[in-house]
Image (tube, rainbow, N blue to C red):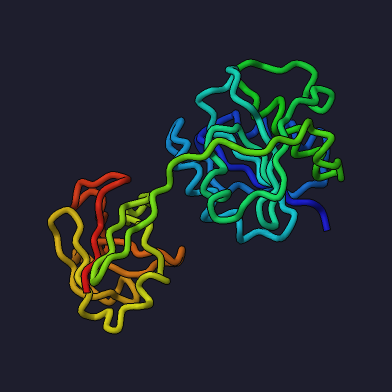
Amino acid sequence: MSAIITLTTDFGSGSPYVAAMKGAILGINPLVRLVDISHDVNPQDVHHGAVLLAEAATWFPPATIHAAVVDPGVGTQRKLIYARIGDGQYLAPDNGLLSLLAKRHKPARIVQLTNSEIWLPDVSNTFHGRDIIAPAAAQLSLGLEPERLGPSIHEMLMLDWPEPRRMENRIEGAVRWIDRFGNLITNINAGLLADEKNVSTLRIQCARHDIVGLSQAYGQRSPGDLTALVGASGYLEIAVVNGSAAQMLKLQVGASVIVES
């Protein structure tokens, strides 16, 4: 079976930059299997990229190589790194893009990308994704040992990922990300809610709106209704049936969500 390389960027779905990265990879290993996780990360939004990568990457087969580029600091002194996290291999700028994954599973290895012999011959100051990360991913797919990429380092830059607070009869959390449907996905996981004896009487407060009870599916409420449920990611989310909770409530990432029993 050929190796798999995934790509996650903020380049945009129709961008030639995506094709350039793929071309750089295929020029080294034409048999590799390329999979797009997303190229619609909000521009220069490292937090958003970290969430999308963490949501999708862990579903891939062991040893999959994940190349991620959301890099507002390209061309500066920020590092480029390789990390072994769980069963996956990751290449990214060291700007927090891998930090949600690293929060969930401590990296077994982190390597700084410094071996220019593996890079493309001419490295642009504005496109390290094509000229450094892409060829490194391709070489790994051919069996290159990670230590050939550069020296081991002991830590990576971590973004702040607040945890929900559990108190008596109350959980205080926040919106972690917003999907394209306008669903507000929180940092309150299903495990915290599993302790509640009667989910039908829970009160979920968000932007001065109260939702009573958890639904099992979006369609259990009528179109236009505000609803709360545990989504496919295993986290509590706030949704509007056939609509956008983000638009209705005019909320952004970080907004408070409170669950009371």
Q: Residue at image x 36%, y 50%?
A: 178
Q: Residue at image x 46%, y 63%?
A: 233
Quadrant of the frame with the C terminus? bottom left
Q: Is residue 220 above or below residue 79?
A: below
Compare residues 168 and 201 and report the one nearer the observer: 168
Q: Residue at image x 30%, y 74%?
A: 219
Q: In screen coordinates, is 56 left or right of 128? A: left
The residue lying furthest to the bottom in this view is 197
Residue 2: x, y in percent? 82, 53
Residue 16: x, y in percent? 59, 29
Q: Residue at image x 47%, y 36%?
A: 46
In which quadrant of the rendered view does residue 212 lie? Answer: bottom left
Residue 34: x, y in percent? 70, 47
Compare residues 180 and 235 and report the one nearer the observer: 235
Label tally? 0
Compare residues 185 and 39 and report the one nearer the observer: 185
In which quadrant of the rendered view does residue 242 lie? Answer: bottom left
Q: Is residue 87 above or below residue 78?
A: below
Compare residues 228 and 115 and report the one nearer the observer: 115
